[in-house]
Amino acid sequence: MTARARPDPLFATDDQFRLLVESVADCAIFMLDPGGCIVTWNRGAERLKGYRSEEILGRHFSVFYAPEDVAAGLPAQVLDRATREGRYEGEGWPKVWPSPRGGA
């Protein structure tokens, strides 16, 4: 009789969570590195923001803001808040710079 290897519960949980986030299509969920560059991108982000993952990964999240908001430092304020609080959640964005495909 051979013993079956049991999966690591933490790995299974991480993998399941990743699959869950990737499958969400009605909510944009993405993560940034400490400098504000996009490191993850789900289906909802693709649908709502109009960028495919290969187009947006590695770019700074300020691309979602209008030029006047970037000039006013809004992306830097959001990143600072996320750094202090561990995350930032926003319902819509006051001014979203249009994606290359015309979506918001």
Image: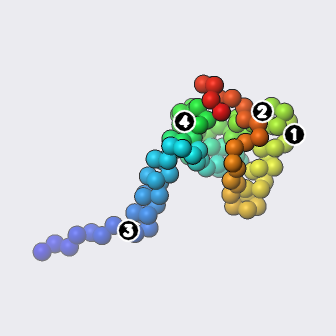
Q: Which residue is nearer to you in this view: 69 or 47?
A: 47
Q: Secondary structure at mark 3?
A: loop
Residues at marks 3 and 4, CA–CA distance in whole angstroms: 33 Å
Q: Secondary structure at mark 4?
A: helix
- Tell me if I can see residue 41 in this picture: no
- Which mark's residue is nearer the viewer, 3 or 1? 1
**Disc 4 vs disc 2: Cβ atoms closer than 8 Å?**
no
Q: Quadrant of residue 102?
A: top right
Q: Secondary structure at mark 2?
A: loop
Residue corresponding to mark 2: 66
Disc 2 residue crowd, few under 14, some 14–19, many 20+, Cα 10 Å: some
Amino acid type at mark 4: Arg
Furthest residue toward left = 1
Q: Where is residue 83 shown, x and y percent of the image?
A: 73, 57
Is 84 left or right of 22, judged from the image as shown? Answer: right
Residues at marks 1 and 2, CA–CA distance in whole angstroms: 10 Å
First along the sequence among labels 1 and 2: 2
Relative height, residue 69 to residue 86 (above, below): above
First along the sequence among labels 3 and 4: 3
- Which mark's residue is nearer the viewer, 3 or 4? 4
